[in-house]
Image (spheres, rainbow, N blue to C red):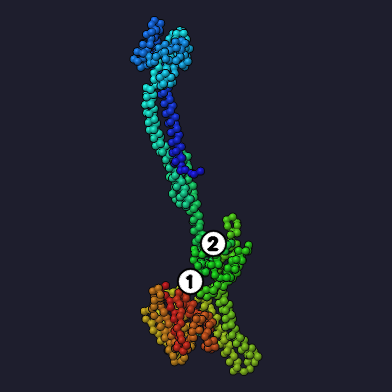
Amino acid sequence: MRNRPLFWQIFLAGLSVLILAIIAVSWYGTFMVRQFYYGQMRDDIHSRAILVRPQISSLLRARPASLQEFCRQTGRAARTRITVIAPDGTVLADSNEDPRHMDNHGHRPEVLTAMGGKVGSSFRESKTLSRKMLYVAIPLDSDHPAAGGILRLSVPATSMDRVLATIHRRIFLGTLFIILLAALSAYFIARRISRPLEEMRAAAEQLASGRSDQPVPVRDTHVSREVADLARSLNNMADQVSRRIKIIIQQKNELEAVFSSMAEGILAVDLGHRVIRINRAASEIFQVDPQAAKERPMEGVLRNRGLQEFIIRSLRETDAIRKEIVLDAADGETLLSLHAVPLFDGEGKRMGSLVAMKNITRIHQLENIRRDFVANVSHELKTPITAIRGCVETLLDSAGDDPDASRRFMEIISRQAGRLDAIVDDLLTLSRIEDRTAKSAIRTAPENILTLLEACRQTCLLAAEQKDITIDIACDPDLQGDCNRAMMEQAVINLLTNGVTYSPEHSRIFLQAEQVRDDDGRQQVRISVTDQGPGIGREHQERIFERFYRCDRARSREAGGTGLGLAIVKHIAQAHNGTVALHSEPGRGSTFFITFPASS
Ligand code: ADP
């Protein structure tokens, strides 16, 4: 069945009931009026019959021949048909017709009643006159009704019908008017009942569409209690739903925040290999848009075959699985540690796998560096130790027989011990710098850079003079820089020492400092050490600041180098939020730069 709007249902039902009631009342009213009018007329004719009865009775007894004329005249005057009927039913006189042509009236219903001594009346078609008439018959002799004859008076129904038709018309018009009023009332009643429900329906729809902030309007005064209660319940429900939605949204946002800010890459894949979710870290690893990746087959999102196979395996497994894979990227290889666990929905049904991935490239690199470092340190320490052991064993064997040889061995032992000392010193320095950098504990102060450079030159002057190397300083006397003086001096001295060590005799070293701006426009102090030495090949330049890296191992050792000098410079620069750089070409000298912020 088609669902009609509530308004029309109430309106049509109400209107039908009202129309039926009005029609029934009108019909009953018409009927009662008719009955009343009929009764009135009958009483009226009966009164007239009572009035003329004595005269008719006396005429019937004394002068029957003049009865017909009396009836005719009286009947015309009273506009009433008067009929006198003998006890056998023969019509003796009639005001409108000739009694000789009239049939026997003994069986007329009103006549029969009158014969029984009562007032007879009938409303029917007259056989004689062929029109509707109201008859009233009474006995002429009330003591002997059957023997005295009957007096019957009648009037045509036309006048009565006319009056009744007028009354009917008025009742009909009145009914129409009342029906109109009823329709209007039904309209307003239907509107009043259906409108709050319509408003509630609209509000419920809004609620269903997720807008729970608009309460359903409740008009206590104009609606029924049930409707008001319903609206209040709806409002309560909207309130509850809105509060729950807010909590859910808040929880979702919190989860979203946790999910997207996780350093670990997270990827959820369903059983159909579609990506359910991918967080920012994972999308950065695979360089995909997290929103665009959603719902897409993982094969189109994750190009790495190893990863795809791992995920497919995890979808078959019921336990967590792990693996490490290598991703090829434009900027090198990335080592990923994968950990997949089964993913279940709220009802505990398996829906896919959740893969956590961690970029362990850096850890791996650090591990390699640590391993290399340990190997390098061991190697660097082993060389002087082996030399010392060799000398000591030789000395023990020859037991100092040859004083010159003993002295030579002692000198070697002393030199190698000094080397060991230098390596340990540099290692300690490095670890101290690293320690302080990690704790952000280096203390800086504004320093005059020219004074700092002068102090460094002083330290290296003796060594420089031995090779007849001149150290020239070029620096604005007012140049200031925020630094840890001892550390910065050590870095500059390391660079100057290298310059002196690797430069030929009678050459020059330029020690300069100036103020520059970085790419962001911030003031920086740049210290540079330029020598006229052998220069450094391009193949070494990238690694030269690594620990124990040497371009020419034999030469460095011979010069007493530890291979840690430049690594210390780099760490000191980094501890000052600065950088180191190198410009060099083989055969054309080298320039080392330390750049750090002018003020912290
Ligand atoms: P070392 O103690 O061996 O000098 P460094 O870390 O100071 O260790 O230097 C690393 C290597 O860089 C040196 O062994 C040397 O081969 C090269 N080097 C450093 N400074 C210079 C320079 N001014 N000219 C040429 N080579 C240099």
Closer to us: 310 or 333: 310
- What crowding class fits label 2: few (fewer than 14 Cα within 10 Å), some (14-19), or many (20 or more)? some
Q: Residue at x 49, y 44 (%)?
A: 2
> Residue 299 at x, y = what percent?
55, 67
Q: Distance from label 2 to label 1 (Cα)?
A: 42 Å
> Residue 557 at x, y = what percent?
54, 87
Indicate which disc residue 55 carries. Answer: none
Choose top left, top right, bottom left or bottom right for residue 14: top left
- What crowding class fits label 1: few (fewer than 14 Cα within 10 Å), some (14-19), or many (20 or more)? few
**Which residue is farthest right?**
397
The kind of residue tagged 2 is Ile
Q: Nearer the viewer, mark 2 or mark 1?
A: 2
The number of numbered discs placed on residues in the rendered structure image is: 2
> Residue 163 at x, y = what percent?
37, 24
User: Can residue 330 be seen in this snapshot?
Assistant: yes
User: Can residue 123 be seen in this snapshot?
Assistant: no
Residue at which label 1 appears: 440
Choose top left, top right, bottom left or bottom right for residue 393: bottom right
Indicate which disc residue 276 carries. Answer: 2
Q: Quarter holding the C terminus?
A: bottom left
Left or right? Give the position of 8 relative to 374: left
The kind of residue tagged 1 is Ser
Q: Residue at x 38, y 29 (%)?
A: 169
User: Residue 281, relative to residue 196: is it above or below?
Assistant: below
> Residue 513 at x, y = what percent?
40, 81
Give the mark nearest the N terminus, 2 or 1. Answer: 2
**Could you tell me which secondary element the residue under label 1 belongs to?**
loop
User: Residue 234, relative to residue 455: is it above or below?
Assistant: above
**Could you tell me which secondary element the residue under label 2 belongs to?**
strand
Closer to us: 220 or 109: 109
Left or right? Give the position of 278 relative to 508: right
